[in-house]
Image: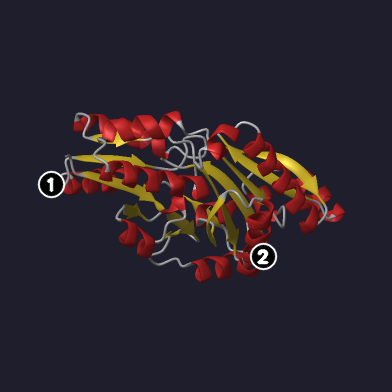
């Protein structure tokens, strides 16, 4: 049986401690703050990130250095036969395309997965890859499965303020000003690797109802056959909003008692850069069975 290394980055929401526990290799994502480079989970903690963001200093995301990734692959291939590399969705970053291009130099030993996922659902893909590797699947088989099932997931997010979406160019300054004046909070969705608007609401209660209804539509519609096979999971994530996230998690457990709840955790900082604090997010996704 081939030894397979599974590599991902902190866009998955996986911390270094969790990576060590489950057995994947984790690349910390870089951020640029006042011209200085920081790395998620290394010299940029969740607490430090939100402190900097609240101060008004501009935070921008960056791709991992591809030369460092290639060197990592070379080192891993001294101990492993093949590598499955799972970066952020190609719809949200160029990291996947860049890694795919450089992986061609490794004669099939490095398989880059265009899984079209991020955060909650991306973490699930990493776990699926690890489980498939334990079963004896090779890197190419794992890549094929993850890409074929990439669309079997949804993420919904309540954003507390339009400020950071405006900074990132996701909404125009005029729309952000009007939305703030009217007290509008957007509910966003991530499906197929792209961030889109789902609805506009006035309060957290309405946002939760909107997200729950969206999950119901998914789980009773296009994912109904997966629910019947116990192949779907639900999770909650947040940005600097742990108590509200735990409360929301309990609501989802009551709302969907037949579907296993997976985890409640912080969102990746790459998402927080564009959404700011006090985000509530939920997601459903297929698991490998």
Q: Left or right? Give the position of 165 relative to 237.
A: right
Precedes in sequence: disc 1 or disc 2? 1
Relative depth, front residue between 44 and 205? 205
Figure check: 279 above or below 105: below
| Mark-to-mark CA distance, 1 and 2 | 46 Å
Determine the secondary structure under disc 1.
loop
- Please give the name of the residue rendered at 72% of the width and 56% of the height, measured from the top-left corner: 161
Residue 257 seen from this side: yes
Determine the secondary structure under disc 2.
helix
- Please give the name of the residue rendered at 36% of the width and 62% of the height, measured from the top-left corner: 16
Q: Which of pointers 1 and 2 indicates the residue nearer the eye?
A: 2
Q: How many residues crowd mark 1 within 10 Å: few (<14), some (14–19), many (20+)?
A: few
- Residue topped by disc 2: 247
Q: Left or right? Give the position of 5 relative to 190.
A: left
Q: How many marks?
A: 2
Q: How many residues crowd mark 2 within 10 Å: few (<14), some (14–19), many (20+)?
A: few
Q: Quadrant of residue 174?
A: top right
- In the rendered image, residue 14, in percent from the top left (x then y), is placed at 42, 56
Instruction: Classify the position of the C terminus by image quarter.
Output: top left
Q: Left or right? Give the position of 43 relative to 194.
A: left
Q: Quadrant of residue 241?
A: bottom right
Way the structure is coloured: secondary structure
- Please give the name of the residue rendered at 41% of the width and 40% of the height, measured from the top-left corner: 288
- In the rendered image, residue 231, in percent from the top left (x then y), is placed at 49, 41
Figure check: 138 above or below 155: above
Relative depth, front residue between 61 and 285? 285
- In the rendered image, residue 39, in percent from the top left (x then y), is placed at 40, 60
Q: Are marks 1 and 2 in contact (CB under 8 Å)?
A: no
Question: Outermost residue, left direction?
Answer: 78
- Which dot marks residue 221? none
- Residue topped by disc 1: 78
Q: Left or right? Give the position of 283 relative to 74.
A: right
């Amino acid at each position: 049986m081939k030894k397979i290394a599974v590599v991902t980055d902190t866009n998955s929401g996986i911390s270094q401690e969790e990576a060590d526990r489950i057995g994947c290799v984790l690349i910390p994502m870089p951020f640029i703050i006042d011209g200085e480079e920081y790395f998620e989970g290394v010299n940029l903690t969740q607490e430090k990130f939100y402190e900097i963001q609240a101060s008004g200093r501009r935070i921008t995301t960056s791709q991992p250095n591809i030369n460092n990734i290639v060197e990592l692959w070379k080192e891993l291939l001294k101990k492993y036969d093949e590598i499955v590399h799972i970066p952020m969705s190609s719809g949200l970053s160029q990291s996947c395309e860049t890694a795919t291009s450089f992986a061609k130099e490794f004669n099939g030993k490095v398989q880059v997965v265009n899984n079209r996922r991020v955060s909650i659902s991306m973490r699930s893909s990493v776990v699926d890859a690890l489980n498939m590797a334990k079963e004896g699947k090779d890197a190419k088989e794992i890549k094929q499965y993850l890409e074929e099932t990439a669309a079997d997931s949804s993420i919904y997010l309540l954003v507390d303020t339009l400020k950071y979406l405006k900074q990132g160019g996701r909404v125009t300054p005029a729309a952000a000003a009007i939305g703030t004046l009217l007290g509008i909070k957007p509910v966003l969705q991530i499906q197929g690797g792209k961030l889109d608007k789902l609805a506009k609401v006035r309060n957290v209660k309405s946002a939760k109802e909107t997200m729950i209804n969206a999950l119901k539509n998914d789980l009773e519609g296009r994912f109904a056959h997966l629910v019947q096979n116990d192949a779907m999971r639900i999770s909650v994530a947040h940005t600097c909003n742990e108590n509200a996230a735990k409360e929301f998690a309990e609501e989802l457990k009551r709302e969907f008692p037949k579907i296993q709840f997976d985890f409640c955790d912080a969102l990746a900082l790459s998402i927080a850069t564009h959404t700011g604090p006090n985000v509530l997010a939920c997601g459903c996704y297929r698991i490998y069975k």
